[in-house]
Image (spheres, coloured by chain):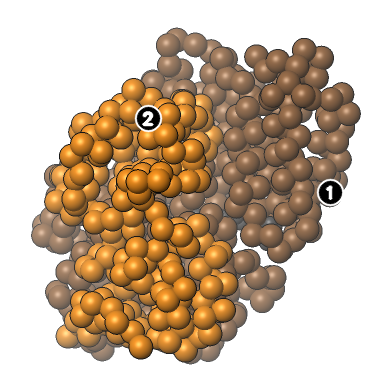
Amino acid sequence: MKILTSRMDAHPSDSHTISRYLATGGYRSLKKALSMEPADIIAEVKASNLRGRGGAGFPCGVKWGFLADVHPRYLVVNGDESEPGTFKDRQLLERDPHQLLEGVIISSHALGVNHAFIYIRGEYPKPARRVQQALADAYASGYVGRNILGSGFDLDITVHLGAGAYICGEETALLNSLEGRRGEPRLKPPFPAVEGLYGKPTIVNNVETLSNMPWIVENGGAAYAAIGPEGSSGTRLFSLSGHVRRPGNHEIVMGMTFGELIEDLGGGIRDGRAIKAFIPGGASAPWFTADHLDVPVTIDDVAKAGSMLGSGAIVVMDETTDVVKAALSVVSFFAHESCGQCTPCREGTTWLENMLRRLTVGQGRAVDLDLLLDVSDNISPGLAWPPRQTTICPLGPSAVSPVLSILTHFRDEVEALVTTGVSS
Amino acid sequence: MITWSKDRAEAAQRILGSYPERRSAVMPLLYVAMAEYGYVSEQAMRDVAELTGLTPVQVSSVASFYTMYKREEVGRYLVSVCTSVSCHLLGGDDVLHAVEAETGVPHGETGPDGTFSVEHVECIGACGGAPAVQVNYELIEGVTPEKAVELCQWLNATEPDPLLGDEMQALFGGQRSFDWGPSESTGSKGPVPAFGPYSTAGTDRLAGP
Ligand SMILES: Cc1cc2nc3c(=O)[nH]c(=O)nc-3n(C[C@H](O)[C@H](O)[C@H](O)COP(=O)(O)O)c2cc1C
Ligand code: SF4
Ligand code: FES
């Protein structure tokens, strides 16, 4: 069953246009929503059990319920998608921008918002062009702007482009960026729902989360909740990459195992090789191995098994992978993207990067293994999962995930670099 | 005194009108200024400060946070090669080395004749089409080291303007993250991302009924 990608599948040549959108039932849910009381729409979203698709998996309706009773208030769409391995929001922005816009308009009506923002990462000019065109068409057709469809509801939507900073995906960093500041995360609380953009109550939701709204309004929250296992209702778009035969995005009902997803949808490992490891939920997530192929793809099962479904990005590594180099690639990412506010993150990620690099170039020392753990512990005290966060945002602890993963699952390979000095 | 082209000056006013507070316009205005001057020059930052009511130091502090605001002149073609994990697993590092060797420009630098700037970048959301490359932020997926070399030669020889992602994908790309849909005739006009009209961000708030 498909919710998010059915239009683009059926109409690959023009699913992004307003004419195709209208011809396939588009903006019908908006009409319905405008005739509903905002509180009733929120009740449907609560009933849907839709959980955020941006990484944290927080129940959307519950978050909406936290919105403080102060006006003006804002809705901000998180389209910063930059977690290595993740490319699902790009497809939704590029191939079905009106679905997102309709979701934004419905949500704004439900939340009493008259100005919404869509934050798209700067490296996405084509998705941005598509969304900007869609928005211009939606304004011209009266779906956005003053007195929408005669309902008396006014809404402006502004597209805001990022400029190359992963950390702006973190919601409070994103708000700072939208305010024209450096994209540095804020201390929470206060949470954005209380004090967000310009100090006003703000809901931040992911692109995929909001793209579900037209379906939920049309079919009802209960129908959405009935799809998939408890706690992971609805369909979800997973990004599959790495050493699989058929990489790409797959919209599935959650609950199948990772093995099935990789084998049946991804076509298995390329060149008939064996799997060595996989990252189940974006670069921040602790790695799984072949032993975890039976874990069901649900938010709660992955958490129970010691990782997270995160942004829905599954990165597969086959048996030929040099896991130390792969971990280095992930750690370098976090070192590069640390905003620098917290010492353990700023210094620690660079230390981890330098130590891993030393190992991969044959200069690893025996003491480095303990040192890696020690520095990891400084960033993420106790090395617990989920991390005991002592930094302002979770980026710091994220950098620890690949390090602990290789030390847990492939310690012998890391040790081998100390004695032989050669990365296999 | 701002001396931007008429189109860009108008775009700036529209951008300022797209936000409840002027300060929010800093980022989109930096893009417009970059299109005007080719990079975020001192003058560009003074202009943006004047438009938003910030000080040039405040603008500079914002600009320096974001990697896409280039504070030095960049080449006509900015080649960005992804080396994050999915691309790394499928040879992104080899693609980067091939680009460096072909252009003679090490990553992080611009060649002396101003044709190429080369950089390695973190994930550009094209992991299903790894290894991925952008030229002036237009995407090409499934690039091999050999194709990357041909891409650089083609840029040098044909000097395409505008630069179309679909054309580059057809000529030099392979595996894609997903079907791209119909080809576009919009592309980049220089080493600045080609967003909507006038290469600017924002919407026309006045267009509503
Ligand atoms: C370092 C970091 C990066 C993040 N990047 C993104 C992102 O690119 N896109 C996104 O939607 N959420 C991202 N998030 C999660 C957001 O902070 C936020 O939880 C999310 O946008 C809320 O939307 P949702 O409830 O619909 O998932 C990130 C979080 C952190 C800590
Ligand atoms: S944990 Fe890292 S990225 Fe997050 S606020 Fe602190 S320094 Fe910045
Ligand atoms: S890892 Fe290269 S595009 Fe995502």
Q: Tell me the quadrant of the picture where the N terminus of chain A can be found.
A: top left
Residue kind at label 1, given as amino acid type: Asn
Q: Spatial distance from mark 1 to mark 2, Cα to Cα? A: 43 Å
Q: Tell me the quadrant of the picture where the C terminus of chain A can be found.
A: top right
Label 1: which residue?
Answer: A378
Q: Residues within 10 Å of mark 1 (few under 14, many from 20)?
A: some
Residue at position x 59%, y 44% in the image = A333
* Left or right of A260 in this view: A275: right
Query: Viewer-proximal residue, A52 or A296?
Result: A52
Vertical relation: B132 (above or below) A379: above
**Whole-percent x, y for residue B186 in the image:** 18, 54
Q: Chain of mark 2?
A: B
Query: Viewer-proximal residue, A325 or A313?
Result: A325
Chain that the image shows in brown: A
Q: Colour of chain B?
A: orange
* Left or right of A63 in this view: A307: right
Q: Quadrant of the rendered structure where residue B26 is? A: bottom left
Residue at position x 21%, y 31% in the image = B171
Tell me, yes or no, whether the two marked residues, 1 and 2, touch with CB atoms within 8 Å. no
Label 2: which residue?
Answer: B102
